[in-house]
Image: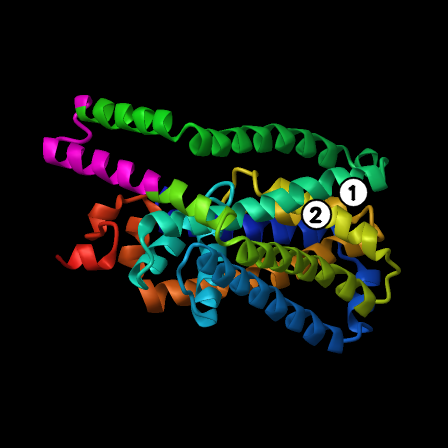
Amino acid sequence: MSLRKGLIIFILLAFGANAVVIARSVNQETLDSLLAADKSMLLVALGIVCLAWACDAGRFCALARSAGEYVSFRLGIVLTWLNYFGSAVTPMQSGGGPFQVYVLYKKGVPVGKGIAITLIRTMLTIMILSLSVPAALLWDPEMLDRSFFLKGLTYYVFVVIGLLWAFILFTILCSGLFKKLGNFVILWLHKLKLIRSRRTVMACVNWLDREMDNYILNFKLAFNTGKGWLALSVVLSILHLVSLFTILPVLMHAVGLPFSYAQTVATQAIFMFILYFVPTPGGSGVAEGGGALLYSTLMPAHMAGVMALICRFFTDYLSIFMGIVVVIRMLGWGVSENLHKGAAPEAEGLSDTPAEAEK
């Protein structure tokens, strides 16, 4: 799937789901509540979004320091927006990493370190969510019984998350075997003539070997010599998620809806955990429609749909828009398309470091 096609699918699914949600849930009572809402709470919600961006950017900076690199706060903000954009145009929100690794490389961070930094960032979020979901279910065992949709997706995600953690542990604990499997795949592609020249085959093998060594090395740096910075990134990760989860209670307060803060946070944690593994670009369609179904357990049905859409605007659409601006101005559409297609570093003239590439 091309970058342009992924973005188009995201927009079509999002607008289609928005239209269906509005048509099926909005009534006169909904409009009256929105017109009587405290509009100043929208500014509060926007401020919380900025706080979430700041926490995510700070997390990038801390993880870079744990790996012995320096990333400015301004660059951290750029990486945050790029992640939202890349996630919006790929299934299971998996496309932010290549953009981040490329930008980090252009700022002097080796590819292996960039991969380790972005992967640890994602792992922290998934780890926190994977721990918060069981905690939420223990706190409120009947939560899943309120929504058959939520129950089914939660079981699906537990299977996916188990496979993901197994793969990550495999790459760390069995890096030698992973290299051999990678080399086997490269040779297999050569036999299929998808990689034609032997020079390219050797370049791919050398690149995989070098970057796997960097990948493992930087995990060790983060968990050994960079423990303080890693601890800071954990704190910032928690604050980032709490900030995002606070937006819905603020919006509910704006329209005068009663709420339990703990329940709204727990419900959103489960839903965000699910959206990481939804196979549509950026979780579009499911995020809007599923949010409307899920939020109906927290508020009247005539408000659940519009609250889901407004919350989605603050938590995702704003960040995706900023990511599009960054992609166009900083990378250009052509480079972004190559990164989206998973081009190897050599395709962009990259080696392990910018200095080596210049040689």
Looking at the rendering, which quadrant does residue 90 occupy?
Answer: top left
Q: Position of residue 258 (x, y in %)?
A: 89, 60
Q: Dividing the image into 4 quarters, which one contains the C terminus? A: bottom left
Left of 221 or right of it: where is 232?
A: right
Residue 290 makes an appearance in the image: no
Can you name the residue that lies furthest to the bottom here?
A: 40
Q: Residue at x 52, y 51 (%)?
A: 121
The stretch in magenta equals 191-213
Closer to us: 156 or 121: 121
- Magenta stretch: includes residue 152: no
At a point 50% along the width and 48% down the height, the residue shown is 224
Cβ–Cβ below 8 Å for labels 1 and 2?
A: yes
Residue 200 in view, yes or no? yes
Q: Quadrant of the N terminus?
A: top left
Q: Residue 150, located in which quarter of the rendered image?
A: top right
Q: Which residue is mark 1?
A: 136
| Figure check: 339 above or below 191 | below
Element carrying mark 2: helix
Question: Of the residues shown, which amino acid type is indicated by label 2?
Answer: Ala
Q: Is residue 209 above or below residue 257?
A: above
The amino acid type of the residue labelled 1 equals: Ala
**Dominant secondary structure (helix, strand or loop) of the stretch shown in magenta:** helix
Q: Secondary structure at mark 1?
A: helix
Instruction: Work out whether residue 116 or residue 264 is closer to the camera in this orientation and state it.
Output: 116
Q: Quadrant of residue 230?
A: bottom right
Q: Is residue 42 left or right of residue 286?
A: right
Residue 269: mark in rendering: 2
Q: Residue at x 32, y 64 (%)?
A: 107
- Give residue 50's position: percent from left, percent from top: 60, 70
